[in-house]
Image: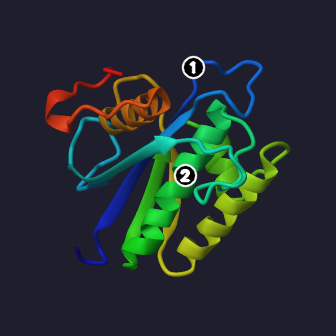
Amino acid sequence: MTSSEKISIYVDGSCEENKNVTFQTPAGWGFCVVIGDTGLGKGQGEITIEKSGKVITEINSKEFIGAEVGSNNTAELCALAHALKWLIIEGSDTNAVIRGDSQYALNIGSGIWKAKANKELALHVQKLWIEVSSFRNLTHEHVRAHRGHRWNERADHLAFRAMQGREPLPVQFWKPGQR
């Protein structure tokens, strides 16, 4: 990959029981890395990496990154955190754009907004954002949820399945909108 190419990463979080959330409320995150994406949602480009998992609220877990409860917002922030960690490990200086349907997560994570809740998790994500921004051009774009945007729908599928504790469908057997 040349430095003139751009990495697109789609992030999403999922939490079905998003009222009266606790540390026991199931929530999941997912992201997919797409090369050759135009951002228009028509499915151009190719997924090269996809990852997903449950939001970890157990403080003693080695995977804990600050989420005190399982909620849609903590799931969205976790998706962003894991995408940023991937960019650090990937290590190139290729420009990257993170696209997601949560303005909350994108604006908190990039430091545009100040967190009023989920402060430990928000600080963790902001530190990762700063680290990634130190060696590559990093931007974010908001996409509308559940509007047929192919790669956002894929990130949603990954997050939803992770919340349920299920494996995602292989991309060749999956259709946008299918959770």
Name the quadrant containing residue 172.
Answer: top left
Depth order, front residue of 131/3: 131
Q: Residues within 10 Å of mark 1 (few under 14, many from 20)?
A: some
Residue bearing mark 2: 80
The percent position of residue 119, horizontal first and vertical second, equals: 80, 51
Q: Is residue 146 above or below residue 57?
A: above
Considering the image in quadrants, where does the N terminus appear?
A: bottom left
Image coordinates of residue 94 in percent, x first then y, are: 36, 74
**Distance of mark 1 from mark 2, alpha carbons?**
19 Å
Q: Which residue is mark 1?
A: 16
| Residue 31 can be seen, yes or no | no
* The label number, if any, that marks residue 69 in the structure image: none
How many neighbours does mark 2 have within 10 angstroms: few (below 14), some (14-19), or many (20 or more)?
A: many
Point out the tag, 1 or 2, that comes first from the N-terminus: 1
Residue 127 location in percent, x, y? 67, 68
Are dots 1 and 2 in contact, CB under 8 Å? Answer: no
Of residues 40 and 124, the one nearer the viewer is 124
Q: Quadrant of the C terminus?
A: top left
Q: Secondary structure at mark 2?
A: helix
Which residue occupies 40% across, 70% down?
95
Seen from the viewer's position, the closer of residues 12 and 135 is 12
Kindly identify the amino acid type of the residue bearing the numbered disc 2: Leu
Task: Identify which residue is drawn at 57% across, 56% down.
Answer: 81
* Helix, strand or loop at mark 1: loop
Q: Is residue 73 above or below residue 148?
A: below
> Which residue is pictured at 71% across the width and 53% down the height?
66
Residue 66 in view in this figure: yes
